[in-house]
Every structure is written in C-alpha cells, then in structure tokens.
Image: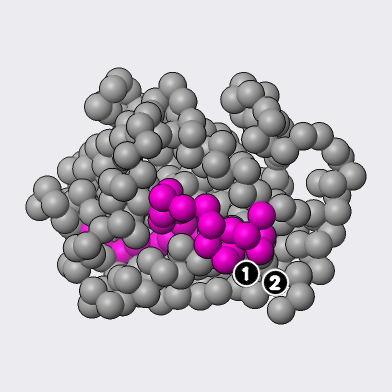
Amino acid sequence: MPLDSQCQKLLELIKQLGGPDLSEMDVATARALREQQKLPPGPAADVSERRIPGPGGDLAIRSYRPLDAKAPAPLGALVYFHGGGFVLGSLDSHDAVCRQLAVDAGCAVFSVDYGLAPENKFPRAVLDAFEATRWVHAHAAELGIDAARVAVGGDSAGAALATAVAMLAKREGGPALAFQLLLYPVTDLRSVDTPSYLENANGYFLTRSAMVWFREHYLARLEDRDDPLASPLASSDLGGLPPALLITAEYDPLRDEGEAYARALQAAGVPCTLTRYDGAIHAFASMYAYIDLGRAALNESAAALRAAVG
C-alpha cells in the first residue's frame, strides 16, 4: 500500500522542521524534544495521581476513569506503559491516549511512570512495570476495579514491557491477567536486520539508527538481548499467556518482529488478533488527532478492551 496521505503530511512537516536524527542527540536533548511534542488533549475523564512502592523507590501512577455515571462498578482495568524506546516518554506524553482508551473502553486506565534508561538499565523498567501491575491487582477493591478483569498494554517499548509483565505473571503464579493490548511492540532486540528494518530504515518517523540508539541505552550487556524479558520473541514458552490484540504498521521498522510475535503466540495456543494498518507509520495511534488510521487503531483497541475487561 502507498504511504497514508495524512502520515505523509506529518512526515513532511517533521522534515521541514529539520534537526538531527534522534541517534545523534544526547538523552537530555531527546527527552526535552519529546516532551515539547504536545498533542491535543484527550477527552474529559476522572484523573488522579498517586505514588506507590516500587523495586527501586516510589513510582508515580496516573489513573483515568470514564466520567459516565452509568459505568458499572467495579470497573475493568488496563495497566498501561508508554512508549519511547525505554529512554523517552512520560505520563504526560501519553495522557491523551490513556484518556481516550478509558472513555472509549469504559474501563479504568493506570499509566505507569517506570524508570527510564540509561539511568535505569534493563531489567529495571520491567520490574517497575511488574510491581505496578501487582500493586494495582492487589489494591483492586480500594481502586474500584475488578481484580478478575485487569489487562496490561502499551505502545512500542511500552508494549514490550506489557509482554514482559505477562511473562513474569505466568512465571510467578500471578497476578492473573485478562488481556494484552500490544501496539507496534518491540519484541526482538537481537536484530535490526529484518526486511521491515531495512525497508523502513529512514524517512518513516522511527529510524533504524534510533532503535540502535535506544537499545544501546537500555541494555547493560550485549547478552541481555537474548533474555525473553527484553526480547519476547526469544521465548520458547509462550503458552498460557493472556489473549492479545497486536497492532502493527506497514511503514515501521518494528513491523516484522511484531507480526512474528503474534504468530508465535498463536502457535503456542494463545488467542491473538493481529491487525496490520497498511500505509501507517510507527506511533500512528498516538497521533490519532491527526491521522485517521490512528483513530481507527484506537477504536479497535478500545473495542477489544471493552470485550475483554469492560
């Protein structure tokens, strides 16, 4: 499929603004630039923040609930991990997406401010994500949610954390998770030479060199690439994981590894719906205010969440 016209316009605007590739920036500059990329605010929701104990200190969590007085109590819940290559992103950068999912899916959403690399190397973000999920599940009654209807999800690096949380929950015997929402996930840090990496190496928002930059900041040791908690596609035991919706974008370096992971889940007997959005670029769902394909991906995500935990 040709590149979506709205994605093309956005890429042209980014090109006009100029500036170096992410891989040529220091971390502080890259983070500041990411936080300047403000998206239109999401819909109104009941939003609150709290701090909870984490493996390396307190973690900030922002919760979202639909304002609809008719929403059933207790609510189902989604524990959400933002994207940003394990280095960038924040509660604020994904505020609109979390609001939209809470409202459209009719569930509570808990966005987790996990530790970023390089200050926090792998597996810190994974452990933060897992402890936050355990905390939400353990405090379900206090939070007004149903412990039997808790999902995990995220986009890009955040989706990788969601997969790792699901693996750890299986390994540790809980918490029980009902669903995985995986938007264009990072599933294999072992290789940047898949056809989609080579076809979409430059010019489609996420670059191959940026992914190398993210990987170098995230992993403390080269051999960590082989750990299934860093590269879920390296796992030889995916059976028994929660059902999943996995969304990919045609013009995304991560397309092939995401689709390979969906097939691996299916081969292991895990119900997994795979949807590729032809013509789309990486992170298109977060750009839903400008890209109709992104709005469609969020609609599909919300419908899947509503069916699983709503």
| Local secondary structure at mark 1 | strand
Residue 284 screen position, x and y as percent: 64, 59
Residue 42 screen position, x and y as percent: 62, 50
- Viewer-nearest residue: 229 or 9: 229
Whether residue 287 is visible, yes or no, is no
Quarter of image, res 239: bottom left
In the image, residue 136 sits, relative to residue 288, either above or below, namely above
- Amino acid type indicated by mark 2: Gly
The quadrant of the image that shows the C terminus is bottom left
Q: Which mark is residue 279?
A: 2
| Local secondary structure at mark 2 | strand
Residue 220: in magenta span = no
CB-based contact (under 8 Å), mark 1 and mark 2: yes
- Which secondary structure class fits the magenta region best? loop
Q: Residue furthest right?
A: 16
Residue 256 screen position, x and y as percent: 50, 66
Asked if residue 46 lies left or right of residue 141, the reply is right
**10 Å crowding of disc 2: few (<14), some (14-19), many (20+):** some
Give the residue at x 59% y 64%. 196
The quadrant of the image that shows the N terminus is bottom right
Whether residue 124 is visible, yes or no, is yes
Give the residue at x 28% y 22%. 56
Residue 194: in magenta span = yes
Where does the magenta region start and end? 177-201
Asked if residue 45 lies left or right of residue 207, the reply is left
- Amino acid type indicated by mark 1: Glu
Q: What residue does disc 1 label?
A: 250
Distance Cα–Cα, label 1 vs label 2: 6 Å
Give the residue at x 46% y 70%. 259
- What colour scheme has been applied to the protein in the rendered image? one colour
Give the residue at x 18% y 43%. 138
